[in-house]
Amino acid sequence: MDLMEYKAKELFDKYEVPTQKGIVAECPNEIKSLADTIDYPVVVKAQVQTGGRGKAGGVKFAKNEQEVVEVGKSILGMDIKGHIVKKVLIVEKAEIARELYVSIILDRLTKSPMIIFSPMGGVDIEETAKTDPDKVIKVEVDPLIGINDYTIRYLINRGGLQTDLFNKLHGLLKNLYKMFCEYDCTLVEINPLAVTPGGELIALDGKVSVDDSALSRQSDILEFRNSLDENELVLEARSFGFLYIPCEPEGKVAVMSNGSGMVMSCMDLISKEGIEVGVAFDLGGGATADRIAEAVRIVLSNEKINTLFISIFGGITRCDEVARGLKAALESREDDKMVVIRIEGTNKEKGLEVLNSISGNVIPVNSIREGVKELAARREMI
Ligand code: GDP
Ligand code: MN
């Protein structure tokens, strides 16, 4: 889960990593009403889950209350690498003497957290790594020891920085590391980390990625994620542990399977026939009849979907459970949406018996290809 800058900075505040004072707004009126709560000049920044906003025109300066509304208007709604800007962060503009780079990542090679530091901040770190590899300094952190004085001294020496930055950098990195551990992060990045003319450090930008597998114990991050998705079916599916992914806006076919690889294979074959897929739905493993019934109910409650394509490989998941779940879901519905279903594996024969007893418009098939053929033959009905 990648956090947007404003959320990352909320965490920075909590851990006393210095940031500028700021406000978040979703529309020009909101900017107008908050415009006098902040000191000028300010920086107006698009809030999207992608980097390189500066280059794309998503970071602009404003000198006063009138200008900030104009600038905010021009950034809201902007498309940055496919992300539409729905929020802007407005912060008091910091004076910069120098821009540094710092991040902590979970390094899979050394299996430990790793600090990446560079005296050349504000620019693309991958680019610096290519052109000036000496200027990108990496230090592993032993999780039993954490960050120590010598780590900071090493970074300062190798980075060619003034030793009077020692205390500030030490404090900042210790706090950042604490946050990295406590929030189950896979990445925290500050680029640029500004040194002000007065010798203070300020995180001008912030990027934080939290390990998805740890979200169950990170309730505020979970809440943030849910606040981003407006699609109620996505949220409802998530509450059952399913993955509901909206695809083509005009697609009328939903693809449901137990495993993302099989979902994608089905989608590829269906798309090859020129049929658009509206929803991809991953059941995950070990689905029981009750869960299948919920899944089918959720997908078919999308009014745009009139056809359901199911492919199940029964290992732990039993085919008869799947069939019974489907039966329960379809028989509680008034409409007669078409279902093409392939089941294979554990208890297949029992499953087919159940499928044949369903009164609705169900087409059992023996393979994904056969299912796609059946779908294509009925394309007029879709
Ligand atoms: P990014 O392009 O998505 O990484 O967005 P950043 O937040 O890093 O902003 C891009 C650039 O804008 C930074 O590298 C800075 O040079 C500049 N910038 C951002 N905030 C400030 C600020 O408060 N003061 C000044 N002087 N420049 C800023
Ligand atoms: Mn940046």
Image: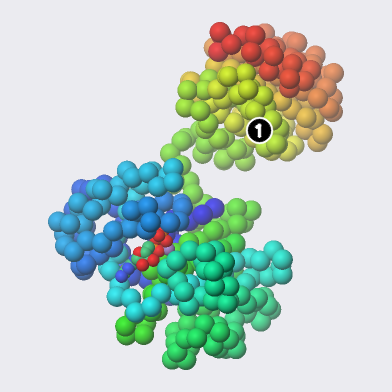
Q: Position of residue 77 (x, y in %)?
A: 32, 43
Disc 1, SS: helix
Q: Residue, x 38% and y 78% (percent of image)?
A: 98
Along the line of sight, which residue is nearer the eye, 291 or 111?
111
Q: Is residue 5 above or below residue 223?
A: below
Q: Write down the quadrant of residue 131 in the picture.
A: bottom right
Q: Position of residue 93 (x, y in %)?
A: 28, 69
**Ligand 2 appears in which quadrant?**
bottom left
Residue assigned mark 1: 264
Q: Amino acid at mark 1?
A: Met
Count residues near mark 1 (Cα–Cα under 10 Å), then give few for <14, some for 14-19, many for 20+: some
- Residue 147 seen by the camera: yes
Q: Residue, x 20% and y 48% (percent of image)?
A: 29
Name of the residue lying farthest toward the left: 66
Q: Is residue 7 above or below residue 233?
A: below
Q: Residue, x 67% and y 27% (percent of image)?
A: 266
Along the line of sight, which residue is nearer the eye, 326 or 212?
212
Q: Position of residue 323 (x, y in %)?
A: 73, 21
Total numbered labels placed on residues in the image: 1
Name of the residue lying farthest toward the front: 131
Mark 1 beta carbon near ligand 1 (under 8 Å): no
